Image: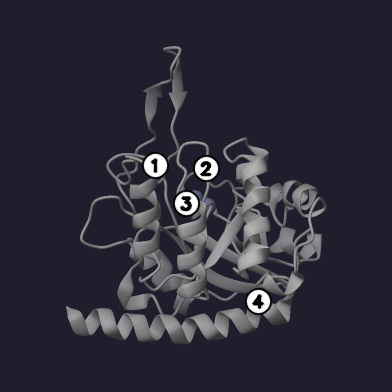
Amino acid sequence: MLTVDFHTHSIASVHGLNTIEELLRQADRNGLAGLAITDHSPGIDNTVWLSHNRTGDFCWEENIKGPDVPYFMNLLSRYEPPADIRVRLFRGIECNIYSDSDRPTDVPVFISDRFDVVIASVHPIPPLFVVENSLQMTERMIRAMDDPIDIIGHPFHKRYSPLMEPLMDAAVEKNIVLEVNNSSLQLGKADKLQARQMLEMAAQKKCRIALSSDAHMANELGGDEEINLILDQIEFPEELIVNRSEASALDFITQRKKVRAEIKARLQKGN
Ligand SMILES: [Zn+2]
Ligand SMILES: [Zn+2]
């Protein structure tokens, strides 16, 4: 079980199944020290996509609609967990990396310095992100690192694959964290061997890593079984894991809030 889970979704993400309070209570039961609620940013229309797969059967695409900005404003400034909740709530967002837009991501810039955690992820659903090739993927993901974000969510996926070494070099240079996502491994969306290669390269290049469940329901909170199966096979330096403890998570958040405030000021000045 993770000590601090940096990536989870509530019912506000539309395809999440539990309320924030239900998630906090389950995190308490699981003994987590910290829990980040990182609902999807507004993204595109509230559409559940139906498409054909290769054999011609209908399959469900991910529904990536997130809550509107007022939800995040309330989460940031008005929401307080019930007094008997012990787990520390981190207020976050998972924003989308765009493939073709003037902006690298859809993080709401005006509140970007107030989040505890900002994840930026590729969700390969047109028109949000049209995957062309690995080079384009890599460029778009590196470009997103200049936005007020902290973590690249599920950086590798069976439906897209950025170039590992340039992506990691950029992450180290720009002080951005790469995520190992338990749900992606569990649901077969990410390749286990590739995740292991990413961790081996991260250990070598001293790239910081976040471990997350990407829970979309309470029973998935703090889940790290698939990640641990990989970590058990290699020697990975614990100090590179930003959410290894409550103290390291708090340090990381404090640093990143300052960096995001600087980036926000620069972006607003440019406008
Ligand atoms: Zn995601
Ligand atoms: Zn997610």
Q: Amino acid at mark 4?
A: Ala
| Rendered location of residue 10, percent (x, y) | 55, 55
Measure the C-alpha gap from mark 2 to mark 4: 25 Å
Expressed as whole percent of the image width and height from the top left, the position of residue 136 reads 33, 48
Please identify, in this view, whether the residue under mark 2 or under mark 4 is nearer the observer. Answer: 2
Count of marks placed on residues: 4
Q: Label 4, label 1: how many angstroms apart (C-alpha)?
A: 29 Å
Q: Amino acid at mark 1?
A: Pro
| Residue at numbered disc 2 | 157
Quadrant for residue 127, please give it: top left
* Badge 4: residue crowd in 10 Å (few <14, some 14–19, many ≥20): many
Look at the numbered disc 3 and say if its residue's Cβ is closer than 8 Å to ligand 2.
Answer: yes
Judged by depth in the image, the label closer to the viewer, 1 or 3, is 1
Residue 13 x, y percent position in the rendering: 47, 51
Looking at marks 3 and 2 on the same chain, the residue that comes earlier in the sequence is marked by 3
The residue that disc 4 covers is: 249
